Each structure stands twice: as structure tokens, then as C-alpha cells.
Image (cartoon, grey):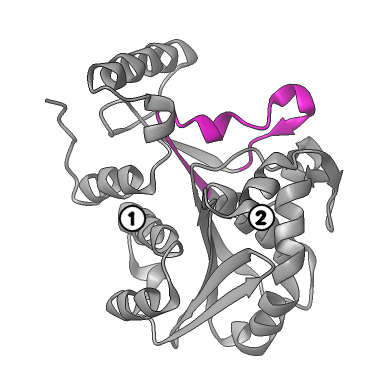
Amino acid sequence: MITEMDFPARSLFFAKIAQLAYEDKKTVTNEAKALGFTTIEFYNLDGAQAYRLMNKDDIVIACRGTQPEEFNDIKADLGAAPVLAETVGRVHMGFKKEVDELWPMVKEDLLRVGKTRKGWFCGHSLGAGMATIMASRCQDDLTVPNIEELYTYGSPRVGWRAFVDNLAVTHHRWVNNNDIVTRVPLTIMGYVHDGEEHYLNAFGNVRQMTKWQRAKDRWRGLVMGFKKGGIDSFSDHSMVNYVAYLETYAKGMESIQN
């Protein structure tokens, strides 16, 4: 049962599921069973994709993030115009369109089996944006069972202030150092972040930092990336890195940079 996990273990658990959401149904089915799930459903409509993982205690909706080879995903990411949300305020048009495709199926399943299980949402990148909007719809639709928590990784900004202020769902939002996706869409467009931020520093360790400390840490990450021949802003968005760092965190250990 997910509620019996402590916060580090739960953060790793949902990171693994968010990463798994990029795989095909056969792979997800096999690996989800190892995580304790018995029933797997794949939602796939016009390029919008998510998984439903379920057992007798929990139901998890994991939204799939951006796949570079999928034009529909790229179009969703670029569709940053703010549009009216189904709930309150304005949200990212591309993310909303993806949710609109899947929501009738997701809602039907939540109504059918959600009342006897604890509900959770998670996602990475585009999937994080979708999961946030889905969680908001659950909160504001009295016919849908309330969800427990929302876990996102490398999430872009999803909505305007009114949308964020209205969203009361417990949202744990993980940010890895220079992850560039967490900085878009720009705040000058009205977008702000939702949820409680958990920051992984340049070494992959969980830290609370002042703005000045964080600015120095970002520079440190950029320099470390250049020394490895990469661009830190992009590599930090990888779910592989999120999972690796959170595995160390869940073990109560610290990452050490060579």
C-alpha cells in the first residue's frame, strides 16, 4: 500500500512509474507487476497517452511525457497559449488539449473503481502538466473520488495564478538542478508553478536553498555539465537522472560527484 511508504520511498516509487509510462504496454505490464500492481490499462487517443495502474488498494494515473519523435507531443508542448481551464483560471492550451482527449476514459475508470481505492497521479515533463490538470479536475468534480497526492518530475509551469491558487491537491514537484523544462512557459506569460518544490542540487542531493545559493548551484551544474561534454539544462531533464538521484535519497544516502 502506497500510504505505508515514507516520503523518500514514495517519491522514488512514482518516479519509477513516471519513467515507466514511456514504455510499451507489454513492458509496463511486466514491470508494474513487480511494483505490486495487478491491472494495467493504456489510454491512447490521437497521441495523448497515459497508463492506469491498479491493485486492490490503489489506482495510479501516470501520464506519458514528451516523445521527440511524436509530432503530437511537440505540438502540445509548443501550444503555450493560456486558455480557460475546466476548473478555475487559465492553463497551457497544449496540455489541456491532451487531457481533453483522455479525460472521459480516465473519469469513467475513476468513477467505476476509484471509490474503493486511493487515487494518485504522476508524470514527467508534458506528462507532469497533464497530471496536474487531471488532478485539478478531480478536485473540482464532486462526482469523482478525491485523490491522495500528485507527484511530478521536471514539470513545466501549467497555469496562471488563479488556477494554482484553486488547486488544493497535495502536489510534490521535483526539480533537478538546471532542468530547462521547469522554467517554461515564461512567467511574463502569466504562468506560475504549483505545488511544493523539492530541489535536487548539482550533485543530485535534496537541498533547500536561498535564491543566491541556488543561483550558484545552477552555475556549478552548468560547469560540471560542460566538463562532461554535455548541456546540463537538457540532461537534467532526463527521468533516468531523477530516478537515480531519488534511489540514493530513498536509501538515506548522499550522491558524491567524482
Quadrant of the frame with the C terminus: top left
> Is 169 rendered above or below residue 90?
below
Front residue of 99/152: it is 99
Circle 2 Cα neighbour tier, 10 Å, few/some/many (<14 / 14–19 / ≥20): some
Give the residue type that dot 1 points to: Leu
Quadrant of the frame with the N terminus: bottom left
Q: Position of residue 163 (x, y in %)?
A: 78, 45
Span shown in magenta? 172-194
The residue furthest right is: 84
Q: Position of residue 68 (x, y in %)?
A: 52, 48
- Residue shown at 73% from the left, 33% from the top: 191
> Is 74 rendered above or below residue 57?
above
Q: Position of residue 220 (x, y in %)?
A: 32, 15
Circle 1 Cα neighbour tier, 10 Å, few/some/many (<14 / 14–19 / ≥20): many
Q: Position of residue 200 (x, y in %)?
A: 36, 33
User: Image quarter for residue 241?
Assistant: top left
> Is 144 rendered above or below residue 202?
below
- Residue shown at 63% from the left, 41% from the top: 194
SS at circle 1? helix
Q: Which residue is mark 1?
A: 12
Q: Give yes or no for contact between labels 1 and 2 (Cβ–Cβ under 8 Å).
A: no
User: Image quarter for residue 136?
Assistant: bottom right
Q: Could you tell which of marks 1 and 2 lies nearer the N-terminus?
A: 1
Give the residue type that dot 2 points to: Asn
Does residue 245 appear to the left or right of 126 in the view shown?
left
SS at circle 2? helix
Query: What mark, if any, has residue 72 been given in the picture?
Result: 2
Query: What mark, if any, has residue 253 been given in the picture?
Result: none
Does residue 27 appear to the left or right of 68 in the view shown?
left
Q: Can residue 35 be seen in the rendering of this structure?
A: yes
Front of the two marks 1 and 2: 2
- Residue shown at 25% from the left, 28% from the top: 203
